[in-house]
Image (cartoon, grey):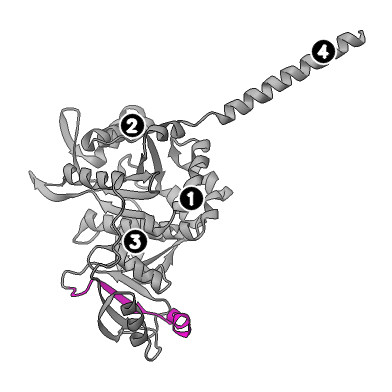
């Protein structure tokens, strides 16, 4: 072979390699479907579905629409009660049966599509993405995150021997592992039933959001990525998930609003349903989409302050501090117990943002909604021993 031919072959090979590399780079630079979608939309909606696989059913046990506004970098999570009355075809059904209808016809994908289309049509939404999580995946994800801190308001006990479900939780502030977290979000054996369960799920989601916001690196954990792509069913691609990491700075508790789908419970022919108010939700959604959030700073917020720290004079000093920040402390007293290790703050009226502002001032994330119909204040603060650092400054 002549030298000229060798050079020609070498140049040809290098040319082919260059074409392959440049072509590959061009493909890598191609925008993902999510990026293309966001070129013409400032809101992306994702349907989150919790499936009850432990009881070997194919019904959606939890349904949440999570919306992200890329302009304001705010999140809105809307819990849809599973008893919500919706139309599918020419008939009306409970929402949690819609997934089952599709699943029986074509498996998981058909079940998801059937539920997604029903929610889109019922509430005039565009939901391009979905995430389906079963209980086993839920347990593993929470364990990888190191658990979630929750203040359990009362003893929660329930046994269903047929399904093997056992719930046994005691009251108090505690970190729940995956198994006990699942028990907490599944419990509904009280007077409020599914509505009470949704209230607890909202509390849990907010606490989970705080856990992730404190350690955003955990989102890139190889273990977590493995569980998500092996145990979680989603139409988000890996590239799309990586693209969303650019918004990880938005993972702050003040950027998350959690609501229950507006509506009222109602019995129809002796069957319990939840009748949604689509227009009320549409107004809320439009406010989230177009308007800037209204700060609650300067609102007239009333507080009762209970000293459970065992530190003499802590109540008066903290009350003075909160009043200097324009909060109205109406009442100061000792808590029933003086052995609180951590400060806990309760929102009494269903408005979590002002309570979180108090939490920021007192440097605690232990902020929970605990509504009481006879409460004369907006917020209850129970001081723990962790307030000692603040007092010394």
Q: Secondary structure at mark 1?
A: helix
Q: Are marks 4 and 2 in contact (CB under 8 Å)?
A: no
Residue at the extreme bottom of the image, as rendered: 312
| N-term-proximal mark, 1 vs 2 | 2
Q: Secondary structure at mark 2?
A: helix
Q: Marks 4 and 2: which is nearer the front?
A: 4
For the residues labelled 1 and 2, the Cα–Cα distance comes to 28 Å
Residue beneath label 1, please? 248
Q: Marks 3 and 4: which is nearer the front?
A: 4
Q: Which residues are magenta?
A: 375-393
For the residues labelled 3 and 2, the Cα–Cα distance comes to 32 Å
Residue at the extreme left of the image, as rendered: 269
Q: Marks 1 and 2: which is nearer the front?
A: 1
Q: Is residue 69 left or right of residue 33?
A: left
Q: Are marks 3 and 4 in contact (CB under 8 Å)?
A: no
| Residue occupying the point 51% across, 58% down | 215
Q: Quadrant of residue 159?
A: bottom left
Q: Is residue 324 left or right of residue 251?
A: left
Q: Does the stretch in magenta take in 388? A: yes
Residue beneath label 4, please? 9
Residue beneath label 3, please? 167
| N-term-proximal mark, 3 vs 4 | 4
Looking at the rendered image, the quarter that the N terminus falls into is top right
Q: Secondary structure at mark 3?
A: strand
| N-term-proximal mark, 4 vs 2 | 4
| Residue 245 in the image, given as x and y percentages of width and height | 51, 46
Pointer 1 local density, CA inside 10 Å: few below 14, some 14–19, many at least 20: some
Front residue of 184 and 27: 27
Residue beneath label 2, please? 113
């Amino acid at each position: 072979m002549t030298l000229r031919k060798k050079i020609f072959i070498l140049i040809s090979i290098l040319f082919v390699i260059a074409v392959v590399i440049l072509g590959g780079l061009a493909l890598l630079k191609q925008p993902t479907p999510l990026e293309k979608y966001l070129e013409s939309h400032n809101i992306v909606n994702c349907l989150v579905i919790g499936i009850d696989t432990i009881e070997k059913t194919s019904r959606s046990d939890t349904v949440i629409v999570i919306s992200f506004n890329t302009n304001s970098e705010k999140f809105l999570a809307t819990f849809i009660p599973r008893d919500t009355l919706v139309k599918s075809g020419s008939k009306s059904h409970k929402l949690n049966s819609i997934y089952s209808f599709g699943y029986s016809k074509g498996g998981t994908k058909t079940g998801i599509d059937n539920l997604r289309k029903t929610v889109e049509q019922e509430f005039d939404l565009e939901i391009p993405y979905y995430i389906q999580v079963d209980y086993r995946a839920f347990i593993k994800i929470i364990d990888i995150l190191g658990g979630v801190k929750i203040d359990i308001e009362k003893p929660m006990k329930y046994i269903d021997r047929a399904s093997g479900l056992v719930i046994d939780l005691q009251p108090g502030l505690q970190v729940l592992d995956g198994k006990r977290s699942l028990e907490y979000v599944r419990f509904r054996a009280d007077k409020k039933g599914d509505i009470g369960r949704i209230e607890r799920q909202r509390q849990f989601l907010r606490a989970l959001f705080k856990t992730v916001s404190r350690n955003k690196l955990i989102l890139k954990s190889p273990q977590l990525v493995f569980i998500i792509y092996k145990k979680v069913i989603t139409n988000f691609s890996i590239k799309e998930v990586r693209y969303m990491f650019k918004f990880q700075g938005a993972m702050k508790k003040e950027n998350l609003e959690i609501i229950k789908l507006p509506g009222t419970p109602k019995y129809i022919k002796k069957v319990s349903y939840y009748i949604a108010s689509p227009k009320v939700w549409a107004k809320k959604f439009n406010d989230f989409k177009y308007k800037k959030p209204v700060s609650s700073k300067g609102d007239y917020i009333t507080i009762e302050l209970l000293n459970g720290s065992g530190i003499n004079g802590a109540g008066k000093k903290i009350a003075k501090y909160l009043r200097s920040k324009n909060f109205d402390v109406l009442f100061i007293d000792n808590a029933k117990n003086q052995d609180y290790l951590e400060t806990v703050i309760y929102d009494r009226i269903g408005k979590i943002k002002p309570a979180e502002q108090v939490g920021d001032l007192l440097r605690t994330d232990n902020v929970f909604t605990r509504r009481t119909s006879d409460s004369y204040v907006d917020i209850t603060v129970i001081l723990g021993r962790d307030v000692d650092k603040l007092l010394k400054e």
